[in-house]
Image (spheres, helix red, strand yellow):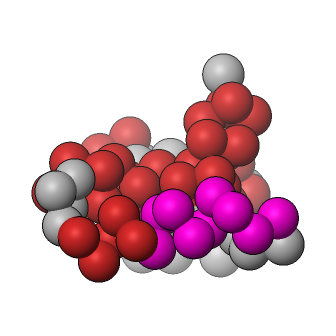
Amino acid sequence: MYKMHHPKSDIDRIYVTRKGRGRGLLQIEGTCKAEIINTAKYLHTKYAEDQLVNIVKSQAGNQPNMNSTTETAAKVAEELN
């Protein structure tokens, strides 16, 4: 059983869960997109009535060159669907 798998044996096994006999790594791009969506949901639900967050949201909507978390989350969600 010792050294059963070669360290570079199969790239596909890298992203398989450990329970499925893989190495259990997460894909960076998917994890980043999921965190963007989760952050936007958190800001929308937890700070819906916060005055300062609402000011920032309104200013982000007025300026065309400003990247906001909610706009980015909307783009990512649309891309995933």
Total count of labels: 0
Find the residue positioned furthest to the right: 65
Q: Measured from the top left, where is residue 2 in percent x and y?
A: 42, 75
Residue at (65% x, 76% y) in the render: 7
Vertical arrangement, residue 40 with respect to residue 69, above or below: above
Find the residue positioned furthest to the top: 81
Q: Measured from the top left, where is residue 66 in percent x and y?
A: 74, 74
Q: Quadrant of the C terminus?
A: top right
Residue at (46% x, 74% y) in the render: 56
Vertical arrangement, residue 19 with respect to residue 4, above or below: above
**Image side of residue 51 versus residue 35, left or right:** left
The answer to whether residue 32 is visible is no
Residue at (23% x, 70% y) in the render: 51
The answer to whether residue 44 is visible is yes
**Image side of residue 72 versus residue 66, left or right:** left
Q: Magenta span: helix, strand or loop, mainly? A: helix
Q: Quadrant of the N terminus?
A: bottom left
Q: Measured from the top left, where is residue 71 in percent x and y?
A: 63, 52
The magenta span reads 56-64
Vertical arrangement, residue 49 with respect to residue 76, above or below: below
Vertical arrangement, residue 62 with respect to residue 8, above or below: above
Q: Measured from the top left, where is residue 40 in percent x and y?
A: 41, 55
Question: Residue 54 sits in which quadrant?
Answer: bottom left
Q: Is residue 9 magenta?
A: no
**Image side of residue 19 versus residue 79, left or right:** left
**Image side of residue 24 versus residue 32, left or right:** left
Residue at (84% x, 72% y) in the render: 65
Front one among 18 and 1: 18
